[in-house]
């Protein structure tokens, strides 16, 4: 696999740096799921507080956090505007804070994990299934997806709202299944685009 470096990665010896890649990726996935499923402004503020505490423990530079927050603010404002229109100010604030919290959580993971280590771990996990999927291409797609988690959470909120519009808001399966399908489709499209450009080829 071609060597790839992550511009956000900050070498260090904190507890988060020492955690296995799998633990961090799983933690980020569970955190993202919690943001989607737990819907309240107070919970959103708790999520944001948790990410800031983790960033402090990982000693992530303030400049890095500010850059990540600045990059997601436009998307967050766009989503919040629609939430305000559909559901009111409370939901708009909740969506905005959720997106910022998720972006910062992704920054903590990428700042404490070299991209090469993450890619190698994903390839290792998928290697037993190499006859069914290309581990390297999937690894690249997943690594890129982690860097675009705010967009993924926006997709989750959009899918959830579509389920609510159909009167299925109380049935998580009604929006989790379409959401997973859309995320996988996006990952495969990303992998195909990378493959077409020769990225990730041996």
Image: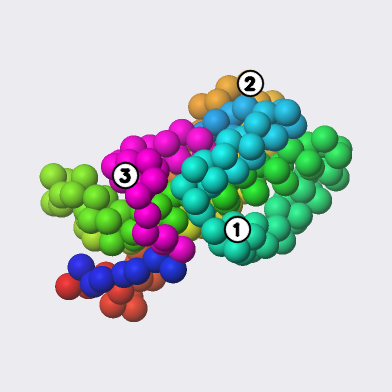
Side (left or right) of 113 relative to 58: left
* Residue 6, visible in the rendered structure: yes
Highlighted magenta segment, given as a residue range: 8-32
Across and down, in percent, residue 101 comes to 62, 44
Q: Secondary structure at mark 3?
A: helix
Q: Give whichever of discs 3 and 2 has the lower sequence position.
A: 3
Across and down, in percent, residue 190 comes to 41, 63
Disc ID at residue 18:
3
Across and down, in percent, residue 48 comes to 64, 40
Query: How would you classify the magenta stretch by its main secondary structure?
Result: helix
- Image quarter (top left, top right, bottom left or bottom right) of the C terminus: bottom left
Q: Residues within 10 Å of mark 3 (few under 14, many from 20)?
A: few
Give yes or no for contact between labels 3 and 1 (Cβ–Cβ under 8 Å).
no
Give yes or no for contact between labels 3 and 2 (Cβ–Cβ under 8 Å).
no
Q: Residues within 10 Å of mark 2 (few under 14, many from 20)?
A: few
Picture residue at 28% right of the left edge, 77% below the top: 198
Give yes or no for contact between labels 1 and 2 (Cβ–Cβ under 8 Å).
no
Disc ID at residue 170:
2
Q: Is residue 22 magenta?
A: yes
- Image quarter (top left, top right, bottom left or bottom right) of the N terminus: bottom left
| Residue hosting label 1 | 62
């Amino acid at each position: 696999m071609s060597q790839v470096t992550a511009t956000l990665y900050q070498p260090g010896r904190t507890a988060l740096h020492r955690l296995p890649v799998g633990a961090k990726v799983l933690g980020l996935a569970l955190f993202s799921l919690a943001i989607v499923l737990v819907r309240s402004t107070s919970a959103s503020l708790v999520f944001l507080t948790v990410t800031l505490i983790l960033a402090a423990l990982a000693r992530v530079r303030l400049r890095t956090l500010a850059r990540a927050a600045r990059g997601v603010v436009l998307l967050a404002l766009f989503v919040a505007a629609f939430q305000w229109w559909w559901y009111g100010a409370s939901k708009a604030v909740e969506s905005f804070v959720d997106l910022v919290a998720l972006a910062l959580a992704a920054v903590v993971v990428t700042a404490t994990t070299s991209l090469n280590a993450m890619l190698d771990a994903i390839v290792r996990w998928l290697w037993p299934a190499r006859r069914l999927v290309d581990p390297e291409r999937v690894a690249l797609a997943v690594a890129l997806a982690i860097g675009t988690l705010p967009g993924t959470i926006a997709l989750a909120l959009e899918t959830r709202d579509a389920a609510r519009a159909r009167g299925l808001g109380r049935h998580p399966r009604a929006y989790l299944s379409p959401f997973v399908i859309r995320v996988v489709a996006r990952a495969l499209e990303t992998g195909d685009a990378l493959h077409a450009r020769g990225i990730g080829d041996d």
